[in-house]
Amino acid sequence: MKHRLLFIAATILVFASRVTFAQVVDSSAEAAFWVAHWAQPRVILFGPEQEGFNQNMQEIMFPWDEASGPTNPNALDDNAQWLKDHPNVLFYIEGYASSRGELTYNLALSQRRANWVKDALVSKGIPESRIVLAVGWGQLYPVCPELNDECWSRNRLVRFSYYPD
């Protein structure tokens, strides 16, 4: 019985690791899809409040391998002010990382970035209850697929998504 359980556990690990490693290598078609997706204006499904959110909330950019301070701190201040002026808006915080480094490291780094932005907004007076979720997506869903410094820097960001009440 123990051998059977070990075999089942090993089989699950093999399949899970194949899925994880498959995500490391983005196909060019998949990367092209996400680049085109982020280049498009966001779709407005929930009316003028969402439209205002999308027009005013700015992406927060981070330096390489950093999660404790953005390269554009004024954008964070502007976002906090807009959120204070619109106290009923709920939102997600989504962190991202460049494709430099390991997938698991980049997932953790992007989560730290999302958490840092969440903490910064709370310290600026935004109630934590308005933040539905702060999540890190790592190097998934790139803005720019090329493997150079310019693209890597464009992928190191935190963005905000509107959550309908």
Image (cartoon, grey):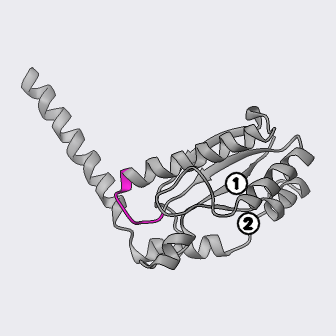
In this view, 146 is above or below 138: below
- Where does residue 18 sit, x and y in percent of width and height? 26, 53
Q: Is mark 1 on a helix, strand or loop?
A: strand
Q: Does the magenta stretch include residue 32?
A: no
> Which residue is found at the position 69% from the left and 44% from the top?
120
In this view, 144 is above or below 90: below
> Which residue is found at the position 45% from the left and 47% from the top?
108
Q: Give the range drawn in magenta.
A: 98-104
- Where does residue 56 sit, x and y in percent of width and height? 83, 61
> Which residue is found at the position 53% from the left and 45% from the top?
112
- Where does residue 87 sit, x and y in percent of width and height? 89, 41
**Residue position marked by numbered label 1 in the rendering:** 160
**Residue position marked by numbered label 2 in the rendering:** 42
In this view, 88 is above or below 61: above
Q: Which amino acid does label 1 sit on?
A: Phe
Q: Is 141 on the left-hand or right-hand side of 131?
A: left
To which quarter of the image does residue 28 belong? bottom left
Query: Nearer the observer, disc 1 or disc 2?
Result: 1
